[in-house]
Image (cartoon, rainbow, N blue to C red):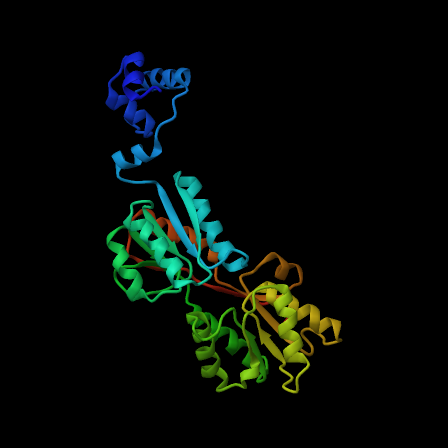
Amino acid sequence: MANINDIARRAGVSVSTVSRVLNHHPYVSQLKKAAVQRVIDELDYVPNRSAVDLIRKETRSFGVIMPYNNNQAFDQLLHGILNRSVERDYTVMVLPTKYNTEKELSYLNKLKNKQLDGIIITSRANSWDAIIPFTKYGAIVACEYTEHPEIGCAYMDRYGSYLETFQILKDKGHSHVAFTTARGEESNSTQLTIKAYQQIFGNFPPEYHIKDCYSIADGVRAAQQLLQSELNPTAIYANGDEVATGIYKYARSIGIGVPEDLAIIGQENQPVGIGLELSTVDHQLVKVGELAFDLTIEKSKEKVEIPYRIILRQSI
């Protein structure tokens, strides 16, 4: 099997020149680059990527920790990350956890073992105290705000967006407002939603909070629980536009008018919500993903906020 010494000898160049060509180094003349590439093609040479990574002390690969990928919010974050990875010629490894703490730690060990140059955390199962020790092995960037100086983050003001959304509903005359979340109170996002709700409306009946909502089917389930009860909410804030779509479909199926009888607002400005003219809170997650990638490649510990947008349509 040919090696770079064989290529250098046949191309009439130094081994270091061959190495520069293989690693896309800009400071190689076009003449030498063409000579080396011709020999590579003739010998059908394929470099040992592990050896190349070892020499240049980087893998040009990032890991993306995410709980699952059947969720529009995480898909949007990943879309932004992949946009940048293509532009910068990096490989991205998706690391699904299903919020399993041990699985998440095993992925973080890939930094320690030099299998990845950095990791982007879209949502975490472990505490920051468990994650921070891994920052000495490579860049770790979060897609949520963290005050820890060792972790860079690209984030949006979730709490501010929840406050503003609930305030809009209150200003529209709604006082019986229900909401859905993906997880229970172990989730930081759920905690912020509840905190914002209580600040605007005070305490709420536990039945007004429907969790484990991810899909249109979950939205239908949530609507059945809320609209068939005696609580009669006049507005529902859904944690995603797919969930909001399920609520909309069920409400219409039983003769409830939107927005005459029920106001609905979702999240993330997804195509299904746009098609149904659903109001939405757009956290601009594609931009968050793009910026998270930029911070990772720069090994930056900066904290950068992406502004959210509230888009009011016919459902309110």
* Residue beneath the point at 37% across and 61% down: 102
Q: Viewer-proximal residue, 115 or 173?
A: 115
Spot occupied by residue 289 in the image (x, y as percentages of width and height): 43, 53
In the visual, does 285 lie left or right of 13?
right
Location of residue 254 (image quadrant): bottom right
Residue 49 in view, yes or no: yes
In the visual, does 208 lie left or right of 34?
right
Numbered circles on residues, count = 0
* Residue beneath the point at 33% across and 35% down: 50
Residue 314 in view, yes or no: no
Q: Viewer-proximal residue, 117 or 144?
A: 117
Location of residue 152 (image quadrant): bottom left
Q: Quadrant of the N terminus?
A: top left
Location of residue 65 (image quadrant): bottom left
Q: Quadrant of the C terminus?
A: bottom right
Spot occupied by residue 96 in the image (x, y as percentages of width and height): 45, 55
Spot occupied by residue 294 in the image (x, y as percentages of width and height): 36, 49
Spot occupied by residue 175 in the image (x, y as percentages of width and height): 57, 85
Q: Is residue 44 above or below residue 67?
A: above
* Residue beneath the point at 39% across and 40% down: 88
Q: Is residue 106 above or below residue 166?
A: above
Q: Is residue 31 above or below residue 55?
A: above
* Residue beneath the point at 47% across and 57% down: 285
In the visual, does 114 lie left or right of 185?
left
Q: Viewer-proximal residue, 222 or 52?
A: 52
